[in-house]
Amino acid sequence: MSLHPLYAKISSKRYGETPYKDVWEEIRYRAETGKYIIRGFGYSGRLPHFDDLLLVPAQLAEPVPVDTYREKVDTTVVIGGGMVKKPLKLNTPVLIAAMSYGATSREFKLACAKAANMTGTSTNTGEGGMVLTVKDDGEIEYTEYQYTKPNGYLMVQFASGRWGVSVDYLLNSDAIEVKYGQGAKPGMGGHLLGEKVTEDIARTRGIPVGTDCLSPARHMDIRSLEDLKNVIKIIRDIVGYEKPVGIKFGPGRVYKDVCMAAQCDIDFVAVDGKYGGTGASPDHSIQNVGLPTIAIIPAADRALRDSGVRDRVTLIALGGFRHGGDVAKALALGADAVAFSSAIEIAAGCTLCGLCSLGRCAVGICTQDPNLRKNFGGGKGIDQGAVWISNYINAVTKEVAQIAASIGHKSIKEFNKEDLRAITIEAAAISGVKLAGLEDYVLPQWKWF
Amino acid sequence: MQNPYICCGKYSESKIVVMGVAMCKEQSKVEVDAANLSLRDVNARIREAVANGFRVHVKNARHIHGLAAGLRSGDIVVEGGAGDYLAMLNGGARVIVEGDVGDYVADGSWSGEVIVKGSAGYGASMYAYGGVLVVHGDAGDAVGQILKGATVIVNGNAGSSIGLYMVGGDIIVVGNAGRLVGDWMIRGCIYVGGMYESLGNNAKEVELTGEDVDKLSKLFDRYGVKADPLKFKKIVPVSLRPFYG
C-alpha cells in the first residue's frame, strides 16, 4: 500500500512536537553507554527567577530617591557581628561562592582570593581543601588564605567528604561553612572525577592520584541535630571562638532546615537555589531536584525570624546571580548578602563550553591540565583573572547601590519585600511578593513569607 | 565549687600559672576535674597545660563531647570514660582513655595516637588521614568510614559497614566484623582476624602477603595485641574506580 503524500509530513510534524524531540540524543547516549550523564555548570531551562520580579522605584511618595552621585549608599555587610571576636566586615554584599580546588584550577582559586582582597569581600575554598604551597623545606603555606589578605576573607568549607580538613585548615581561615548541600545537586554530596585528581589535587585532598573523589550525601559523623550542635561547638572551640561558623543548604525543605540550623548557635546560613552551578553533577539531579532561588530566600528569612535569631544570623543567598538587579531583588526578598559562582567564572574568562566535568576547560578554570592552565586570565595568569573578577564585583556593587538609591534606600540593609512586585503569578505565589499593580496579595496564603 | 585543678606529685618553687592556678613544672602533671565544666573550659585548660609542657589527667568527662579536640601535641590521660568526638581532628596528641568512649572517637585525625582501653561507640576514626586509633574493647558500626590514611585497630569485635568509602589506611579487627565490610571502598586495606558476615560492594578477599604479616606483627607488638597475623583475612577494593569508571 502506498503512503499518502502528506502522511510523512504529518507524522514528522507530530514527532517534532513531542516531548522527546529535545531529549533524543540523551536517550540514545544512555542506551549506547548504559551510563547517566555527568556534566558541569547548572540548570538549563526556564524557572521562575529574578527576571520575574521587578523593583519599585521611589517617586513623590516617601521615601524619596537618594542621589547616588553625591549621597553615599552603605553597601557593607557584617557576618558574625556581636557573636565572635573576628567577624567578617565586607565592603559589598557580593561574596565569591564555594568552588572547590580540584573542580577548578589553582590559578582560578588564587585569582578569586586576590579579588576578595581587592574588593574587601570573602571567597570560599569549597569542599576540596585549600590551595597550599609546599616549600623546599617541607613547610606548608596556606596560599589561598594569604592571597585574601589584608582586606579580604577566606571562608573554608567543612563538607561531608572532609577533604583537607585539619586543625591548621580551620585556623588558617576567617569563617567556617558546614556544607549540607548545593543548588545543582542537593542531597547528592559532591563529586570529583579521577581525571582531575592530579598530583597536587591528590596532595591537597590526601588521596591517591586518579582516585574518584566522593563526598557522601550525608555527613557520616553527624546523624542528628544533637550531633550537629556538638560539631559546631567543637569547631568553635578549635578556632578559639573567634570566627563565624555557618551552615550551607541546597534548595530542599529550606524552612525546616533553617529552623533546625537556627538551634545550632550559628552566625550565618547560606541557601543555594536551583540555578546554582557545579563542576560535575548528574544531569538528572541538576535538571530535576531542588527549588528555585526566589522561592527559598523568603523561606529561609522567615525561618530565621520565627526562630528568633534573625538579628544575629546573616542570610546568604546563592543560585543564578548575574548582576546588581538580581542582588537587589535577593536582598529585598530577605537575604543579607549573596554569593556568585558561575558568573565569577564567566568574569574570569569562562566561555560556557560545557567541559567543566572533563577537565578540558580551554580557558584554564575547570581544569588541572598544566597546558590549559596557562591560558588562565587570557594567558596573563592570576593577576589578570583577579582584575576581571574584582572589576565585575565592583561593577555589580555599584549597580546594587544605584538601585538602592533609586528606591530610596541609603543602605542595602533597608531593602524589603515592598520594594518588589512580581510580573508572573508563579513568581508571586512562590516568593510571597505582591503582583505588579496590586497593593495586596492575590491569595492570603501567599503572604506566608 | 572544687578547684578543677589538682596538682600531683612533689611541689616545687618553680611555679607557673595555668588558667589562674599555680602549677609546678617538676610535677609535670595536671589533673582536670571536668565534672562541672563545659567543653570550652575543659579544652582551654588542657591546651594551656599542654602548652606549658604538662601531661594532663582528665576525670569525670563522660558528658564532654569534643574532649581534647584539635590538639597538635600533648599527653592526655582520661580517667573513666569520655563522650562523643574524643580527640576530633587530632593533630599529634597522645590520648589514652582508661574506660569507654562514645561515638566518633578520633574523628578526622591527622596524627598522634588515641588508645581506648574500653570500648568505642559508632563511627570510630571516621575520615581520619593519619595517626593511630587502638580500641582494646569492641567498636560499634561504621569503623573507619571514609578513612584516608590512618591506622585503626579494634582488639575486640566491630560492627557493620566498616571501611565504607575508605580511600586509604588500614582497619584491623582482631575479632569478628559485621555486614558489608569495605562497602564501596576505593583504596586501603581491611584485616579481620575472626569472621565477617558479608563483604560490601567493590570489596574482595585476597591472600595475605609477607608485607601484610610484617605490618600486622609490628603493630600488634607495639600496641600489645595478642593475635596471630597469619590468621587474618585481607579485604581490598575490586575496582579502583567503582563510581564513575
Image (tube, coloured by chain):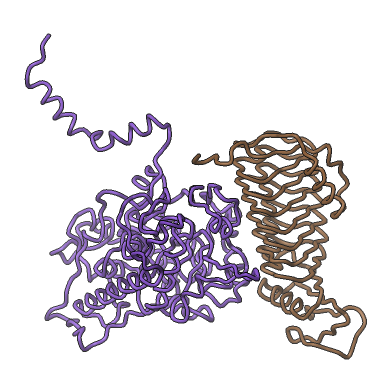
Q: Which residue is more in the foreground, A278 or B58?
A: A278
Tell me how many marks there are: 0
Expressed as whole percent of the image width and height from the top left, the position of residue B233 reads: 76, 37
> Does residue A38 appear left or right of residue A443 in this picture?
right
Which residue does the image show at 67% across and 53% down from the upper left?
A: B149
Which residue does the image show at 25% across and 33% down from the upper left?
A: A20
Is residue B229 visible in the rendered structure shown here? yes
For this orientation, the residue located farthest to the right is: B10
- The colour applied to the residues of chain A in this rendering is purple
Q: Quadrant of the N terminus of chain B?
A: bottom right
Q: Is residue B65 above or below residue A400?
A: above
> Does residue A376 appear left or right of residue A204 in this picture?
left
Expressed as whole percent of the image width and height from the top left, the position of residue B131 reads: 72, 59
Chain for colour brown: B
For this orientation, the residue located farthest to the left is: A5
Q: Is residue A204 above or below residue B3?
A: above
Which residue does the image show at 65% across and 49% down from the upper left?
A: B168
> Does residue A151 appear left or right of residue A436 in this picture?
right
Is residue A191 visible in the rendered structure shown here? no
Q: Which residue is more in the foreground, A350 or A369?
A: A369
Expressed as whole percent of the image width and height from the top left, the position of residue A326 reads: 27, 66
For this orientation, the residue located farthest to the top is: A1
Q: Which residue is more in the foreground, A269 or A96?
A: A96
Which residue does the image show at 77% across and 37% down from the upper left?
A: B208
> Does residue B121 appear left or right of residue A173 in this picture?
right
Q: Is residue A15 above or below residue A327?
A: above
